[in-house]
Amino acid sequence: MPENPSENNSADSGESSRIPRLAIGVVILGVIATLAIYGLSFLPGSGSLEVEWDTVEAIEFPAQKDVGQGSFGVSRTTLSALAPNEDGLLLYRVAGVVRVDSKSRLPVTVRCDVYSRSDENTRIARSSRLRAAWPKPSEELQAQEVPETSFAKFVFGDTKKVDLPIRDVVQRYTDSTASTLVDWPGYNEFFQSWIWTMKDGTGVGAANLPWVVIFEAEDRPKGNIKCRGEIGAKSTVINIPFRQQEWPITDDQPNAEDVGTGDASNVE
């Protein structure tokens, strides 16, 4: 007796309409994982605390120098710090801007090293496994965005991470349209280095190249900024020592409550 085509079609359509058990399992596991991550964000120490620097001081910098027909200088240098936590550890930020003008198409190379020279233990602060330093290495500096804040590992009450401001000192990593490459020449926990390369010079006018690094220390923040500028075959070096003037640092500004998990995507 020939089979009824309508019966076969009905059976096939019923089987095809069922969702495979494996797919259902994957969806359930995804939902459970999402809920677990959401729940963990409310546990003590799992979020990040948004804080403001307890002190911000200007670092005195020298006048710019002539380099051949061009010029080179470092300006807008600041030292910001948080009061020590219960473990006696503090965070401090050093920020500044390199200003270089090649006045020609001669290649430009700039290197800045920021040293932390506190008497006790000190190192570059961490954000997950990454360094709390900006800008990060890039072949297209103009395309690199400046975050509003970025977190650093720092025990603060029940929190193990803090969100720290960035845009108060850096709006963009360069104001030049000239081709600009920035790199980090290796890692040393006591200092952060950047190397900017502009193969065709700075273009029309000067190029401003901001930088920021955050250190953790157990003592009064101090150190040195050393920047070298090369334009063609000519070069110059600028040294800027710094030392925290307000000491001890007092936490006289209440910090905001736990606001989230932070963002480490902007550091290397």
Image: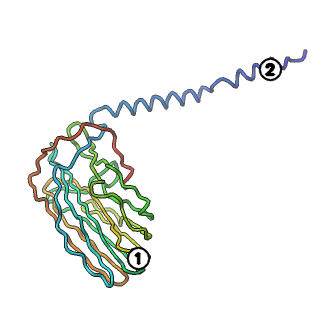
When the figure is inspected, residue 208 is found, relative to residue 251, above or below; the finding is below
Which amino acid lies under the numbered mark 1 shown in the image of this protein? Gly
Near mark 2 (Cα within 10 A), the count class, few <14, some 14-19 or many ≥20, is: few
Element type at marker 2?
Answer: helix
When the figure is inspected, residue 90 is found, relative to residue 193, above or below; the finding is above
Near mark 1 (Cα within 10 A), the count class, few <14, some 14-19 or many ≥20, is: many
Q: Quadrant of residue 205?
A: bottom left
Looking at the image, the residue that sits furthest to the right is 1
Which amino acid lies under the numbered mark 2 shown in the image of this protein? Asn
Q: Nearer the viewer, residue 20 or 228?
A: 228
- Which residue occupies 12% across, 44% down? 252
Residue corresponding to mark 1? 201
Q: The N terminus is located in which quarter?
A: top right
- Which residue occupies 84% across, 20% down? 5
- Which residue occupies 32% across, 85% down? 68
**Disc 1 and disc 2: Cα gap in Å?**
76 Å
> Which numbered circle lies on residue 8?
2
Q: Position of residue 198 (x, y in %)?
A: 41, 73
Looking at the image, the residue that sits furthest to the front is 204
Give left or right: position of 142 versus 191: right
> Which numbered circle lies on residue 251?
none
Mark with earlier residue (1, 2):
2
Which of the two discs, 1 and 2, sits closer to the camera?
A: 1
When the figure is inspected, residue 87 is found, relative to residue 134, above or below; the finding is above
Looking at the image, the residue that sits furthest to the top is 1
Q: The C terminus is located in which quarter?
A: bottom left
Q: Position of residue 126 (x, y in %)?
A: 29, 51
- Which residue occupies 14% across, 62% down? 243
